[in-house]
Image (cartoon, helix red, strand yellow):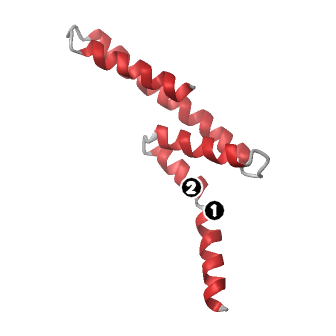
Amino acid sequence: MKYYLLILFSIALFSCNSVKKTEQALNSGNYVTAINTSVNKLQKNKFNKKSPIYAGLLKRAFERYRTSTLDRIDFLERETLKDNSKEVYQLYVQLQSVQN
Protein backbone atom coordinates (compact mmCIF):
# COMPACT_ATOMS: atom_id res chain seq x y z
CA MET A 1 0.00 0.00 0.00
CA LYS A 2 2.82 2.42 0.84
CA TYR A 3 4.43 1.61 -2.49
CA TYR A 4 1.31 2.68 -4.40
CA LEU A 5 1.05 5.91 -2.42
CA LEU A 6 4.69 6.66 -3.12
CA ILE A 7 4.17 6.14 -6.86
CA LEU A 8 1.04 8.30 -6.84
CA PHE A 9 2.82 11.05 -4.92
CA SER A 10 5.82 11.00 -7.26
CA ILE A 11 3.58 11.22 -10.34
CA ALA A 12 1.74 14.17 -8.83
CA LEU A 13 5.03 15.84 -7.96
CA PHE A 14 6.46 15.44 -11.47
CA SER A 15 3.29 16.71 -13.12
CA CYS A 16 3.52 19.94 -11.11
CA ASN A 17 7.05 20.58 -12.29
CA SER A 18 6.14 21.05 -15.95
CA VAL A 19 5.56 24.78 -15.48
CA LYS A 20 8.93 25.11 -13.75
CA LYS A 21 10.66 23.14 -16.49
CA THR A 22 9.09 25.35 -19.12
CA GLU A 23 10.18 28.48 -17.26
CA GLN A 24 13.70 27.08 -16.90
CA ALA A 25 13.84 26.34 -20.62
CA LEU A 26 12.68 29.87 -21.35
CA ASN A 27 15.21 31.45 -18.99
CA SER A 28 18.10 29.35 -20.26
CA GLY A 29 17.46 30.26 -23.90
CA ASN A 30 15.81 27.03 -25.03
CA TYR A 31 12.93 28.89 -26.61
CA VAL A 32 11.85 26.12 -28.97
CA THR A 33 11.60 23.66 -26.07
CA ALA A 34 9.52 26.14 -24.08
CA ILE A 35 7.28 26.76 -27.09
CA ASN A 36 6.78 23.05 -27.76
CA THR A 37 6.06 22.24 -24.12
CA SER A 38 3.53 25.06 -23.83
CA VAL A 39 1.79 24.12 -27.06
CA ASN A 40 1.59 20.45 -26.03
CA LYS A 41 0.10 21.31 -22.64
CA LEU A 42 -2.43 23.69 -24.19
CA GLN A 43 -3.41 21.12 -26.83
CA LYS A 44 -4.03 18.46 -24.19
CA ASN A 45 -6.42 20.55 -22.11
CA LYS A 46 -6.96 24.21 -22.83
CA PHE A 47 -9.50 24.56 -20.00
CA ASN A 48 -7.01 23.49 -17.32
CA LYS A 49 -6.33 25.93 -14.48
CA LYS A 50 -2.69 26.21 -15.65
CA SER A 51 -3.63 27.10 -19.22
CA PRO A 52 -3.25 30.87 -18.72
CA ILE A 53 0.24 30.26 -17.33
CA TYR A 54 1.21 28.20 -20.37
CA ALA A 55 -0.31 30.79 -22.71
CA GLY A 56 1.82 33.51 -21.13
CA LEU A 57 4.93 31.34 -21.29
CA LEU A 58 4.19 30.57 -24.93
CA LYS A 59 3.85 34.25 -25.77
CA ARG A 60 7.08 35.19 -23.99
CA ALA A 61 9.00 32.26 -25.48
CA PHE A 62 7.91 33.09 -29.02
CA GLU A 63 8.71 36.79 -28.60
CA ARG A 64 12.18 36.01 -27.29
CA TYR A 65 12.82 33.40 -30.00
CA ARG A 66 11.67 35.80 -32.70
CA THR A 67 13.80 38.62 -31.33
CA SER A 68 16.93 36.51 -31.01
CA THR A 69 16.48 35.02 -34.48
CA LEU A 70 15.91 38.41 -36.11
CA ASP A 71 18.91 39.85 -34.27
CA ARG A 72 21.04 37.00 -35.58
CA ILE A 73 19.72 37.55 -39.12
CA ASP A 74 20.45 41.27 -38.86
CA PHE A 75 24.00 40.54 -37.70
CA LEU A 76 24.58 38.09 -40.55
CA GLU A 77 23.20 40.51 -43.14
CA ARG A 78 25.50 43.28 -41.94
CA GLU A 79 28.48 41.05 -42.55
CA THR A 80 29.47 41.11 -46.18
CA LEU A 81 30.33 37.45 -46.53
CA LYS A 82 28.52 35.45 -49.19
CA ASP A 83 28.53 32.34 -47.02
CA ASN A 84 25.92 33.88 -44.70
CA SER A 85 23.06 33.77 -47.19
CA LYS A 86 22.40 30.09 -46.60
CA GLU A 87 22.32 30.54 -42.82
CA VAL A 88 20.02 33.57 -43.15
CA TYR A 89 17.64 31.52 -45.28
CA GLN A 90 17.69 28.65 -42.80
CA LEU A 91 16.95 31.02 -39.92
CA TYR A 92 13.95 32.43 -41.80
CA VAL A 93 12.69 28.89 -42.49
CA GLN A 94 13.09 27.94 -38.82
CA LEU A 95 11.27 31.08 -37.73
CA GLN A 96 8.42 30.32 -40.09
CA SER A 97 8.18 26.69 -38.97
CA VAL A 98 8.00 27.71 -35.29
CA GLN A 99 5.40 30.35 -36.10
CA ASN A 100 3.20 27.85 -37.89
Q: Residue at x 61, y 83 (%)?
A: 6
Distance in Å between CA atoms under marks 2 and 1: 8 Å
Asked whether residue 67 is in view, the answer is yes
Q: Hey, which quadrant is residue 71 in on the image?
A: top left
Image position, residue 22 (x, y; %): 54, 49
Residue lying farthest to the bottom in this orientation: 1
Image position of 56 with respect to 78: above or below: below
* Residue 7 drawn at (x, y percent): 61, 79
The answer to whether residue 70 of the structure is visible from this angle is: no
- Which quadrant is home to the C terminus? top right
Q: Is residue 96 left or right of residue 71?
A: right
Residue at position x 74%, y 48% in the image? 45
Kind of residue sitting beneath label 1: Cys
Name the residue carrying label 1.
16
Would you call the spot at circle 1 few (<14 residues within 10 Å), some (14-19), or many (20 or more)? few
Q: Residues within 10 Å of mark 2 (few under 14, many from 20)?
A: few
| 95 to 18, vertically: above or below | above
State if disc 1 and disc 2 touch (CB < 8 Å).
yes
Location of the N terminus by quadrant is bottom right
Is 58 left or right of 74, judged from the image as shown?
right
Horizontal and vertical percent for residue 43?
Answer: 68, 43
Element type at marker 1? helix
Determine the image quadrant of residue 76: top left
Give the residue at x 54% y 48%. 23
